[in-house]
Every structure is written in structure tokens, then in C-alpha cells.
Image (cartoon, grey):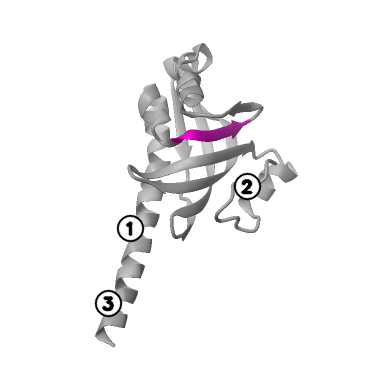
Amino acid sequence: MIEERLAALEDRLRRLEDELAITRLIASYGPLVDAGAAEAVAELWTEDGEYDVEGWHMRDRGQVRDMVESTAHQSLIAAGSAHFLGPASVTVDGDTAEAVCESLLIRHKDGGFFVWRAGANRFHMVRTRGGWRIAQRVTRALDGSEAARKLLFAPRTIGKPHAQG
């Protein structure tokens, strides 16, 4: 009986540690991308991890790094920006997980700040030797579209990437 209780407690602790690690990974994206830390941002993904955002579909770590190093992104952060990913709802199933959250891109202009973009995000995560990594991230603008709403409220697809919206 004690062994069963201990095993159950260990399972609960591991799930909490996994959820915390995933939450921290997602939260680290904003500061890293706003710092222009291209290699660190790319390391959040698996080698073949995908990032599908507003018509830009990156298919591996190198393409994520290239996005951060791009003239468009460098101009954005040089003018002042803050990528904020809100608290994530995380569901862990063994060595895979899904997380859903909203995001804001805040820009600096004329001495003030304004929300430039709001997004819906769905992450498919996998546990690797180096810890949790993003296997797929899909982001859609929260512009009233069905695609964005589907990312926020859709059946969990643990174990397989989410269908493109």
C-alpha cells in the first residue's frame, strides 16, 4: 500500500514538474525573441520542429533561427517590441504534451506602446534528452477567424501534431 501511494505521488510530482518545465519554456520565448537571441530561440524547438505563423511556415530549427535573424524581425525589435505569451493550459501524456495560450505582440511607437497583434497558439511538445521541446507551434491571429478559435478550443491531439488551421 505504501509503495502504491509512493508511486502515485511520484507520478503526480513528475506531471507537475513537466507542466512547470513546459510553462517555463513557453514563457521564455518572448524575452529570447525580443533580445534577438536567435540560437536560444531555435533551441526551444526540436531539430525538425515546425512553427506556422501567419503564412510563414518554418520547418526546422534553422528556419526558426533565420526568422529571428531576419531583417523584418531585427527591425521590429530595434524599434521596441514585447512578445508576451500568456499563461498556458498544459496537458501532459507521458513524453508528449499540448499547450494552448494566447499571445500579444506589443510595439513601441511615438513614445508609447500599443498592441500590434493578438494570437491564439497551440503547441505540440515532446520530451527529449535535453528536456521538453516544441515539435510544432501553430499561431493564428485572434481576428475573429474560426482558425484561431479552433486552436484555443479543440479536442486534444496528444501524440500527434494538430491539424493546420
Mark closer to the chain start, 1 or 2: 1
Residue position for label 2: 162
The residue under label 3 is which amino acid type? Leu
- The quarter of the picture where the C terminus appears is top right
- The quarter of the picture where the N terminus appears is bottom left
Instruction: Say which quarter of the image contains residue 41.
Output: top left
Q: Marks 2 and 3: in contact by CB < 8 Å?
A: no
The CA distance from mark 1 to mark 3 is 16 Å
How many neighbours does mark 2 have within 10 angstroms: few (below 14), some (14-19), or many (20 or more)? some
Residue position for label 1: 17
Q: Nearer the viewer, residue 92 or 26?
A: 92
The residue under label 2 is which amino acid type? His
Q: Marks 3 and 1: in contact by CB < 8 Å?
A: no
The CA distance from mark 1 to mark 2 is 24 Å
In the image, the segment drawn in magenta is 46-53
Vertical arrangement, residue 141 with respect to residue 33, above or below? below
The local secondary structure at tag 3 comes to helix
The CA distance from mark 3 to mark 2 is 35 Å
How many neighbours does mark 1 have within 10 angstroms: few (below 14), some (14-19), or many (20 or more)? few
The residue drawn where x is 62% and y is 47% is: 162
The local secondary structure at tag 1 comes to helix
Residue position for label 3: 6
Instruction: Find out whether residue 164 is within the magenta segment.
Output: no
The residue drawn where x is 41% and y is 26% is: 34
